[in-house]
Amino acid sequence: MDWTFASSAMRRAEASFKASSGEDVYFGVGTFGTSADAQRGLGACYRLSARGVAKDIIAQSINTGYDVEGNQFDLQMGAGGAGIFDICVGAAGSMFDGGLPAWGCQYGGVDNKSACAALPKLPRSAGPMAATGDTLVSLCEASWDAKVRLSGAGQPAGLCKYNPTLLDVTRVRCPEELVNMTWFQRADEPEGYTATDEHRLKGFPNEAHECQSAAMPVGNSSYCLTRMMDCRKPSGAWRNNVQPELMVPGKRLVQTCTADGITRLDVQCGCFDCNC
């Protein structure tokens, strides 16, 4: 939960990075995929520029999938959509109490800021998140305030089908402050934090495409900054998804959490097969 967009931990990391680098950006983590990379982008950081969002986002890919291929980034934010592998709510062992309706669409989550208020504030094991000062409600509201998500109300494609358009996506060096949160770092990183032609992804800068434009079939998320929050262990925490030679020793796997959303499990490796 402390990796969720606009969490208190993320805001502290952003402020530290600004002080050391002069770069004023948002931080994030999420799901990305690209066949142009030997590890499908896992562990890499990308600088994202999205229409309507006041600052660029430097986000690390800690999860991957074939449904986020190269020109889309799925950013983790409060109640951003549980997707196909939901363990946030509504199942035995889920992180939060309550039912599914308050969480909105399976893909995209709640569709307006006011809907955030109906969400549970804290996980079932509430103590660790309560100590951070964050709640799921406040994280959900912060994502609307920052305009990293849009409402589909009144639009032809219906709810949860509208997202900000990505204008530029460039691979950059992962800030130390972000790596210190995920404990996941590539050994083949670029040098800087700014957009360069050398590391810009194919199709960017984007001057011609709109996210979910009328010309696209419903469900096509090309050039979109989409959203997610599935409460599950990410791809980067499974050792068979990473290639050791591409990773910094000691930072080969995402440090995933327990069901309270905060407490980390050391998977670097302290359990059977490292798949803990």
Image (cartoon, rainbow, N blue to C red):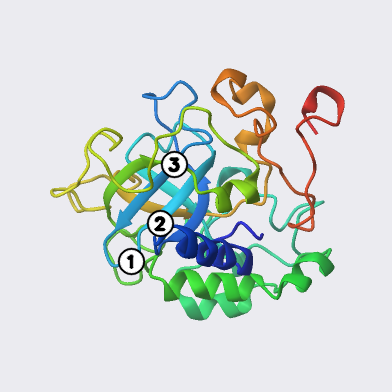
The residue drawn where x is 50% and y is 73% is 142
Give the position of the C terminus as an image quadrant.
top right
The residue where tag 1 is placed is 53
Question: Amino acid under label 1?
Answer: Val
- In what quadrant of the picture does the N terminus appear? bottom right
The residue depicted at 52 percent of the width and 47 percent of the height is: 30
Q: Position of residue 183 (x, y in %)?
A: 65, 42
Which of 180 and 5 lies nearest the eye of the viewer? 180
Which x, y percent locates residue 126?
81, 68
Mark positioned earlier in the residue sequence (1 or 3): 1
251 over 115 or under it: above or below: above
Q: Are marks 2 and 1 in contact (CB under 8 Å)?
A: yes
**In the rendered picture of this protein, how many numbered marks are placed on residues?**
3
Tell me where residue 9 sits by quadrant: bottom right
* Residue at disc 3, secondary structure: loop
Q: In front: mark 2 or mark 1?
A: 2
Q: Tell me the residue that label 3 is attached to.
A: 173
Which residue lies under the disc numbered 2?
A: 57
Q: In the displayed structure, does residue 91 sit left or right of residue 175?
A: right
The kind of residue tagged 2 is Ile
User: What's the distance in space between the residues labelled 2 and 1, CA to CA?
Assistant: 9 Å
Query: Which label number is shown at residue 224?
Result: none
Q: Is residue 35 left or right of residue 85?
A: left
Q: Please tell me whether mark 1 sits on a helix, a strand or a loop.
A: loop
Q: Amino acid at mark 3?
A: Arg
* Whole-percent x, y for residue 252 in the image: 65, 30
Q: Nearer the viewer, mark 2 or mark 3?
A: 3
Specify few, some or many for label 1: CA neighbours under 10 Å numbering under 14, 14-19, or 20 or more.
some
Q: How crowded is the residue under tag 2: few (<14 C-alpha within 10 Å), some, or many (20+)?
A: many
Residue 163, quarter of the rendered image: bottom left
**Secondary element type, mark 2:** strand
